[in-house]
Image (cartoon, coloured by chain):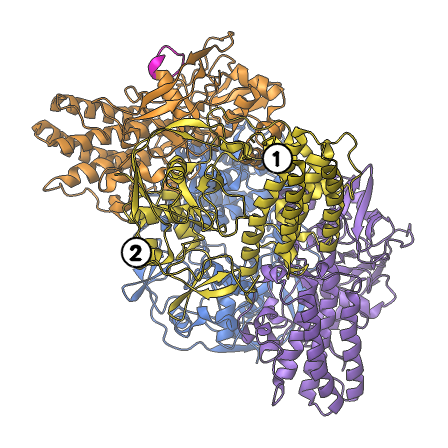
Chain colours: A yellow, B purple, C blue, D orange
Amino acid sequence: MSHIASQRSANSLEFRYAQTRAYSLELIRGLSAEDCQLQSMPDASPLKWHLAHTTWFFETFVLGALDTPPPPLDPRYRILFNSYYVGVGERHLRAERGLLSRPSLDEVLHYRQHVDQHMSALLATGDQSGKLNELIELGLQHEQQHQELMLTDLKHHFACNPLQPAWRDAAPEHPQAEQDKSAQQFVSLAGGLCEIGHSTAEFSYDNEGPSHKVWLEPFQIADRNVNNGDFLAFIADGGYQRPELWLSDGWDWVCSHEVKAPQYWQHRDQQWVIFTLAGEQPLNHGAPLCHISLYEADAFARWSEARLPTEMEWEHAAREHPELGGLFGEVWQWTNSAYLPYPGYQPAAGAVGEYNGKFMINQMVLRGSSCATPNGHSRPSYRNFFPAAARWQFSGLRLARNP
Amino acid sequence: MSHIASQRSANSLEFRYAQTRAYSLELIRGLSAEDCQLQSMPDASPLKWHLAHTTWFFETFVLGALDTPPPPLDPRYRILFNSYYVGVGERHLRAERGLLSRPSLDEVLHYRQHVDQHMSALLATGDQSGKLNELIELGLQHEQQHQELMLTDLKHHFACNPLQPAWRDAAPEHPQAEQDKSAQQFVSLAGGLCEIGHSTAEFSYDNEGPSHKVWLEPFQIADRNVNNGDFLAFIADGGYQRPELWLSDGWDWVCSHEVKAPQYWQHRDQQWVIFTLAGEQPLNHGAPLCHISLYEADAFARWSEARLPTEMEWEHAAREHPELGGLFGEVWQWTNSAYLPYPGYQPAAGAVGEYNGKFMINQMVLRGSSCATPNGHSRPSYRNFFPAAARWQFSGLRLARNP
Amino acid sequence: MSHIASQRSANSLEFRYAQTRAYSLELIRGLSAEDCQLQSMPDASPLKWHLAHTTWFFETFVLGALDTPPPPLDPRYRILFNSYYVGVGERHLRAERGLLSRPSLDEVLHYRQHVDQHMSALLATGDQSGKLNELIELGLQHEQQHQELMLTDLKHHFACNPLQPAWRDAAPEHPQAEQDKSAQQFVSLAGGLCEIGHSTAEFSYDNEGPSHKVWLEPFQIADRNVNNGDFLAFIADGGYQRPELWLSDGWDWVCSHEVKAPQYWQHRDQQWVIFTLAGEQPLNHGAPLCHISLYEADAFARWSEARLPTEMEWEHAAREHPELGGLFGEVWQWTNSAYLPYPGYQPAAGAVGEYNGKFMINQMVLRGSSCATPNGHSRPSYRNFFPAAARWQFSGLRLARNP
Amino acid sequence: MSHIASQRSANSLEFRYAQTRAYSLELIRGLSAEDCQLQSMPDASPLKWHLAHTTWFFETFVLGALDTPPPPLDPRYRILFNSYYVGVGERHLRAERGLLSRPSLDEVLHYRQHVDQHMSALLATGDQSGKLNELIELGLQHEQQHQELMLTDLKHHFACNPLQPAWRDAAPEHPQAEQDKSAQQFVSLAGGLCEIGHSTAEFSYDNEGPSHKVWLEPFQIADRNVNNGDFLAFIADGGYQRPELWLSDGWDWVCSHEVKAPQYWQHRDQQWVIFTLAGEQPLNHGAPLCHISLYEADAFARWSEARLPTEMEWEHAAREHPELGGLFGEVWQWTNSAYLPYPGYQPAAGAVGEYNGKFMINQMVLRGSSCATPNGHSRPSYRNFFPAAARWQFSGLRLARNP
């Protein structure tokens, strides 16, 4: 991760710590302990686990780095709430996170308070080192990532319940987006030798750098994300039945899972409805297409006689044309770039170095941010990544094409 | 099921209804809503689901049989809490019962109250028909079965938590059983033409009848169940490494699951400990062996130069020698009989007819009852049944042999 | 196995050895080495393997029992062609039998000749012991069992080839059976205390004894096997879509495998055709129903308001009414008896004792014999056994019912 | 694919056709029809199938493009020997290729002759169009690819046979390579704006172009491939037991498959032996490391404090420093580049367009060529690709690092 600007006052970090930690609690407002324990698939963790794991991060990497770390509230939490940091020791099985009725939600909230008190004391002194400040900043960014996962995971959990529970009356998705009847317009970019990657003094993850040159051929990119109406035309044209539109793995995936529509779409009584965090809603043609796999994104692009942008094209376009619609805050946009290290990439030393680098295989990059991304967690250099078949994130697409 | 004795007063049924329903609630005393939602494998349901499903049974088969059934508290419960009665319509997936955070435990308890009030009103009138009384009786027996499952399922759920939670400080198992150092003694029975199956006016399930004749050769049966000390000798003698002791399917099971001991046994720091409903305990050599598959029971019997009894031998011995130790209240005892219909067996008409008959394939019979069986739910003709590999029930064995 | 009658001359055994061994070769006449190597599922072995394994049996259990066994042609065959006799040592994986291009078919035929020469020399002396004669007899019976499997396995292998190869122009099945338009008639039997199991001096497997008493209630049994026409009525009546007709495991099997007809049936161009050892044939309504699982047999019986006989009923009826149609030589007839030991059953000592007893779990008994059963391999006490879902054998059913 | 130079005479193509087709037959010399039918996993096809499928390619895409295509030898081969070209219609299941005993090897060889005769006649006229010549060239390149697969697949098939058959006495691998005791030396390259991709008049696949610019940072690359001795040091240092050396997916793969060495390595009697196409051989420390997954390549590189090159770095180095050892003819070299389209990539029109593009997901690029690659099938721009876990190809690695 990049160095944190020296001008950031300790107060500011203290404030942001309080603010970020509070927002995680805000997300579970109105949910029961039972809701917070659900785990509907190995990839989607219980909300209670997210609350505990983000706390574990501060306890392990920040408080644990002090000369005299405070005694743990419960030493067994070190194993229970470790996600994948093998450098920290044994882990609890990911697929069995939903089987932890103990510690209870109340106990986890108490654990949060316990760590928050120690963190508050640390932040109040204002004399923590730059290295420690970086770890705290990383912890906050980490918690923000999990805040988005709390929403995508909860949506998946709730969708498995035939009662179709709602998180809130108003969904973070865009079901009321105005119908955008205009066709997509393509913006042309000249390419050439461009600078890609994070280069400012602001925080970034290690995988966003080093900043480096890439050569781009001229390309065009759409001025908005593909919307539901666009995708309905693909379905109506037999998109899910035409192998020539699909990558080979994609076609196998369509056949073996009998995929006929994006995740959370249901065709009922002659109309499409979608499951949202506000419960079931009629499909809005103008809202951005969401919950699709890379395979669907790629097939739609081929059907459109276009293609997905690379992550470099996306980032370059986002910097040159920040006015493009829906870059941030709508849906993550699949790119046709594999998640691999930039030239000169070096993971951070120690266990926090496992944050990003070890996942650089078998995943594709998504750019932008979604309706579920917390404020302040978006930037042009941000690299999100998921396997090509993943659909439970707020994932959509923006078209690109050659001139 | 047999006819219910006409002398049983409506009052008595009313009393037993209250008592049985209350005992289900007693079982969850001290547990949280989170505990009651756990589902650690498809076969082991959440306790909340058991509480709801037993209620659903009364609502569907008793209140639903009235001329004017009361309005349902929530019509969607009809699907959510149906277990396997296809005659009643759609069902919710068994493996996803743990994903129902809604309805909450509180709502399920409210559902119980709702049905209990209607049942109370019905029972208070005292003029329900014999047919209805039979269904109520069946509902109570059904709830008692689920009370045992609540304990075996909870044990499995808790065993998946590294924190090893305890249900109560005192376990229903027999960890403090006195060491029985005496060898098993075998009682001899002459066999001949015997009567098997339920034949009294008391309640029984349909699968316990009709009472019928079977011819038994002379046999011997042990005066106590096999205990942990007996089984340790089998382990010490390489029992789990010697294929000649095992049925072919059993040996495949041992190899593919790397089985080295009964379920819930752990060898740690040079000694055996077991997980119980009171948490982890040292292994008591004198306590009855428990949580074994039929494969383990069969291999142990072969190693002992003995065999499992048939269910007919067991029942005949239990009637002739009720003084045999541990027939009831210790562990269910595997027999070498497949679960199949008795001659002339007819399932009850309608959906309640699905109670037993449709499971008569690929299962083996266990006889007796266990430490988790509710009072009044044991009798010599009772036929319990599970697949040969099942171990999460309180299942043990008693040896038999030829003279 | 029972004792072999002392009056059987060594010559007779010599003759039968030659005859039985020759018939295995007759079965592969017209097939290529490539045909004989096919393995279409783990349960269905290559014909080359059957030819080798039956030879291995004589080499291991007969020649290997001599004071000075002849040197093996290839010591590695001891592992390669062992099926499941753990007492004999290591085995080659069942599912990988089709991956043995070496030894070639020619080498396997040479192996047969090698063992046959040594067996001939042994049989010519005529002074082998009674114990050895029993093992030779067991080897011949074992080879006959495999001769039936050679046909059922080959049928499965060939059915996977879109070219639909034929074994012979004339199928051993009964596709030209005359249409039997008469309804099934039921024969009544009084039951009572009956003797069941093998009791003559002729050969039998150990699992057919000891002969013992069973008590049978009065019952009725059909005078012919269910035929294709009967089963078409079941299909037409929605038999595969009505869960109430099925055992619970059976219904799961129907749904997960999307079963809509017996194995090898295809509905094409508005008519049913079946794949046979003579290639594809139109379905003959009068021919015995074949290639069904126990689940289908049981569901058909329930739909017919009848049931499957027990194996004891079947055997008793076959002895009392040998004139019943289709007892032998048509299809194996599923019974509703689990494959379990008879009272007093003792497996033979040593590795041959693994022949039958270790499979006595999770299987159901079929009685009679099929069109593929070699001459002389049928008798009323014969117990065939397969898991309830198995369909690749020539398996059908005969109805029974209560009076 | 690029345009074929117009100066290539028809004669030359005729000669190369004969030569290439003959080499496929040379590869099966000494093998039986049974050997040629083996299929040990879905990814590894029978040699008979390769022989037929490469013929099908000419029949379908070349002869089928003629104004009056010759009548097919057997119209059913169109389905049987189609691999994945959905544009050509139905396909036979990949995993069931080993179940085709019919057509026999003889029939397949006859099929080859049949197509060869028509192709000869076509080539003899010398007046085929440039478009047709391109398809013929593509067919020859396609057959060369399958010639390499014939060896890697056969090796996998034979390795499953406990008899460990050998293809030839002399293996194409390098088991007798001289021990190279010198450490690897790293060559430095300055990078900058480089041209990557195929740009000459010679044949190339469509995925090798268009030729395009990329910006490369300065890097270093090793002057030889990693050898077995190098990798033994990794194993001795606990390489397979240290999660910090592995990508997350790689560590999961090591654990779930219990990987302890490269494929075909066995540790026996205190020494390492490897299975080769010449049977089992002692491990030669100086020979290039082979049969490793990308995960192993990546972990070894991390342990070596180096990394894998990108495919662009590899190609650039191969052009600038053709003297580097082992670029071609030893082992395919894993790169850390995902197999994705080059800027401006366009698949060919029609079914041949399915050749490459549809596989551009979830695979990693390997560069160079191996001991099994046919003469004339190597070039600096060649892009081979396999999933990260694949090991049955002749895959190794060459290290790179940052200056």
- Counting from the top left corner in percent of width and height, residue D227 is at 49, 16
Chain ID, mark 2:
A
**Is residue B41 at all visible to an observer of this figure?**
no
> Which of the labelled discs sits on residue A8, or is there none?
1
Is residue A201 inside the magenta stretch?
A: no
Left or right for D128, reference B57:
left
- Residue at 72 percent of width and 32 percent of height: A127
| Residue in the foreground of this view, choosing between A351 and C29 | A351
> Could you say whether the residue bearing mark 1 is in a helix, strand or loop?
loop
Above or below — where is D19 with respect to C182?
above
User: How packed is label 1: few (under 14 Cα within 10 Å), some, or many (20 or more)?
Assistant: few
Which numbered mark, 2 or 1, is in the foreground of this view?
1
Left or right for D174, reference A32:
left
Which quadrant of the figure contains the N terminus of chain D?
top left
- Counting from the top left corner in percent of width and height, residue A261 is at 40, 57
- Residue at 18 percent of width and 43 percent of height: D72
- Residue at 85 percent of width and 59 percent of height: B223
Magenta residues, as a range? D319-328
> Which of the labelled discs sits on residue A341, or is there none?
none
Chain ID, mark 1:
A
Q: Label 2: which residue?
A: A182
User: How packed is label 2: few (under 14 Cα within 10 Å), some, or many (20 or more)?
Assistant: few
